[in-house]
Image: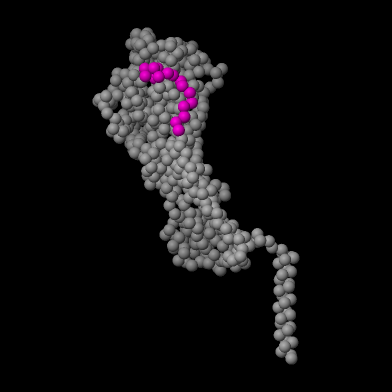
Amino acid sequence: MTKLRFLLFLFFLFYIGIIVRLFFIQVLRPSTSADYLRTRKIPPERGKILDRNNQPLVTNQTKYQLYLEPKNIDDEEILKIKLSRELQVEESSISSKLDRSKEWIALYSGITKEKHDAINALKLSGVGFNEEQSRYYPEGSSSAHLLGFVGKNQGGENIGYFGIEGFYDKDLSGFPGLIRSDRDLIDRPIFLGTQERIDPENGRDLVLTVDKTVQEIIKRRLIAGIEKYKAKEGCIIVVQPFTLEILGLSCIPDFDLEKYYSFDEGYYKNQAISSLYEPGSTFKPLVMAAGIQEGVITPNSIFNEKGKISIGEYNIKTWNDKYEGKITMTRVLEKSSNVGMVYVGEKLGNKKLLYYLKKYGFGELTGIDLQGEVPGYLRADDEWYPIDYATATFGQGLVVSPIQMIRAFSTVINGGNLMTPHVVKTLVGKMKTQKIEPQTITRVVNEEVSQQIKEMLVSTIENGETKYLKPKGYSIGGKTGTAQIAIKGHYDASKTIASFIGFSPVETPQFAILVVIKEPSTSQWGSETAAPLFFEIAKELIVYYNIAPE
């Protein structure tokens, strides 16, 4: 009887314990279904970036995110010691992220397969991995400024910075999926609870206008040119002038895409769209085209090149201070006569000159689909002085970006259409493919003027300083440029920006190339630095595109 009473007493204590526990859970600390519901994101796969021939420029590779579940950690000190050794980080770095109040902590991303296996072999409790995608560059850093890179935002999430990765981040990112699961107190799934999975929507792939082969050619040639001419920096852009598709774009210095974090932020700046320079004589064909369009000159109009021109306290002369007397407008371009261009500007008139500068798109964004473009600068109409109008006719006293310059130049050789440059040809999604069509903004000159300018630029090569560089049998048009660099309000004659802009073939150009070399040391002249670099690239492209001699 005593044993029976003892058992009843034990059952009574057990029953009271259950009641107390239920009172605590349901009254003192009432729980809801949300206490058992665990939600975790499933990261989408970021879209790939391919060249115009579907050759990969950016793909993904599998790496791992290391996470901790603090409630499941048996020995915190041992965990910190072993992880710090494998990850080669300070123990304090792990301690700062370890929060016992949290269910789950993302510790480190970008763990390689080898490191993943090594940490797994330690058999540490409370440690787990999620697969994640990281960017892989089959072509290395040949297109660093074009592509940009993927870094982290303040919340630790992937985000694109600069170039294509930055501009098209939302398209490339996709949308994360979710796993929603009811779990018990020891993190086991509750059979009758919520078990829901929403698959992620992967990012869209981008097919570029860029040709990997063209990109390789210009990057290789640019590196060699910078070294040969001992220049500070340089940039080359290749476009299809009728569509303004970017076929290649490379600037030096650039950065290593795999180790972007080890470079100063200044290296991320894409000079082609984010830097401004005075274009010098490469600007002359644009003003000449405006004059012909307005009917104030023709290619055969005569100008008497007698000597230097005085405008107020300033004197304008030819680059070599030599004068030929009566010359045609074609000859003005051939010998790159500054005084001849001032004459064209006077015939055109100040208002019309400003009108065409704006119509060519200077002082505004081109709309290129790369992150980081700057609009340049074009002073207000009431801020121009007589000397400003004069120097603008030969590309000094105003600043443009390389992408603005090649867009405007393409206008005068493609029949007169100002186009929007672009680097992405097609966005490929699971449900929809979107093609980006060439976009015409306005007509600047007519087709007849465009044809005349092309012929004048061919003559400029045939009868100018660079005629010895042209491959025999092929028609190439172009113009050199040499602009002094303004330092503290004055021009430094020893420091120049050398450039060359040109195209081939003449009748229906397949490519236009702009070469800009900043502060070459071997020679200050564009004809001796940028021009040879242009013709080296042009020769390779003529072979690559199988362009027949004319």
Give 174 or 383, whichever is nearer the viewer: 174
Q: With respect to residue 418, does 347 lie above or below?
A: above
Q: What residue appears at the point 40 percent right and 17 percent down from the top-left corner?
A: 449
Hey, which quadrant is residue 530 in on the image? top left
Residue drawn where x is 44% and y is 45% of the image: 48
Nearest the eye: 291 or 50: 50
Is 439 located above or below residue 99 in the figure? above
The furthest residue to the bottom: 1
468 left or right of 382 in image: left
The picture places residue 42, in percent across and down from the top left corner, at 53, 54
Q: Position of residue 290 (x, y in %)?
A: 44, 17
Please name whichever residue, 217 or 48, is drawn nearer the observer in this view of the structure.
48
Number of numbered discs? 0
Q: Is residue 337 visible in the rendered structure shown here?
A: yes
Whether residue 416 is situated above or below residue 54 in the rendered picture? above
- Per the image, is 348 magenta? no
Residue 483 visible in the snapshot = no
Q: Position of residue 272 (x, y in %)?
A: 44, 33
Residue range corresponding to the magenta coloring? 437-453
Give the quadrant of the N terminus.
bottom right
- Residue drawn at x 44%, y 59% is 115
Whether residue 445 is in magenta: the answer is: yes
Colour scheme of the picture? one colour
The answer to whether residue 489 is above or below residue 178 is: above
Residue reaching furthest to the left: 472
Which residue occupies 34% across, 25% down?
508
Residue 52: give x, y in percent of width and height: 39, 39
